Image: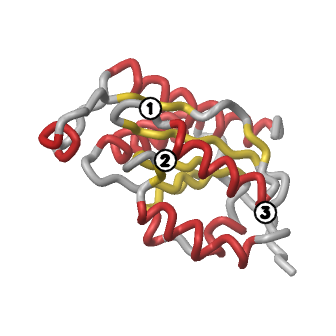
Amino acid sequence: MDQTPPQGLLIVWWSVTGGSEALARAAFEGALRSRATTVRLLAAPDVEAADLVTAAGLLFVTPEMLGSMAGRMKEFFERTYYPLLDRIAGRPCALIVCAGSDGTGAARQVERIVTGWRLRWIDAPMIVVTGAQTPEAIGAPKRIDGPALARASSLGEAMAEGLAMGLW
């Protein structure tokens, strides 16, 4: 049985062309503004089940690739899913998807996993569409616009503040 109560916000991200990383870092910076709770930012390959057990709230950030979440993000969920069953139920979560044109495929995949873990959504998934549609644009480094970065920052801050206030 886990003895230490969960604390703080954990932001789990993966990025291929930089867009998701920029959004995760914006959310992290926003969460740090709250100064009311701890915040950790970890790339998906570096996250272990114990990191999620010790977090009071979770924010996932992934690119959508071929209509699905990125493979490294999927691998993170596959590696941690069963060890976490019945251990993180009820914790608040949110999702940011960086997509070329749609993002709903990746969002649906993460939503199914979150349902299995019985986490609580604090908001609908945030989907940022970059408009990348050609092979060159899809593979190119992404620059996320100011309004999208501001939304990610606000989401991180709101999650941290909500955790600190006991809203979720």
Q: Which disc, if any, is residue 88? A: 3
Image quarter of the C terminus: top right
The disc at residue 37 is none
Q: Which residue is mark 1?
A: 102
* Residue displayed at 69% across by 31% down: 123
Is 120 on the left-hand or right-hand side of 40? right
Q: Which residue is mark 2?
A: 61
CB within 8 Å, label 3 to label 2: no
Mark positioned earlier in the residue sequence (3 or 2): 2
* Mark nearer the N terminus (1 vs 2): 2
**Which residue is drawn at the image coordinates 34% and 53% (left, top)?**
15
Residue at figure coordinates x 57%, y 31% from the top left: 155
Q: Is residue 142 left or right of residue 4?
A: left
Q: Whole-Å distance between the Cαs marked 3 and 2?
A: 18 Å
Name the mark nearer the viewer: 1 or 3.
1
Color encoding of the figure: secondary structure
Q: Amino acid at mark 2?
A: Val
Q: CA distance from mark 1 to mark 3?
A: 29 Å
**Callout 1 amino acid:** Asp
Q: In whole angstroms, how far apart are the C-alphas of marks 1 and 2?
A: 15 Å
Inspect the image, locate mark 3, and give the three-letter code of the amino acid beneath it: Ile
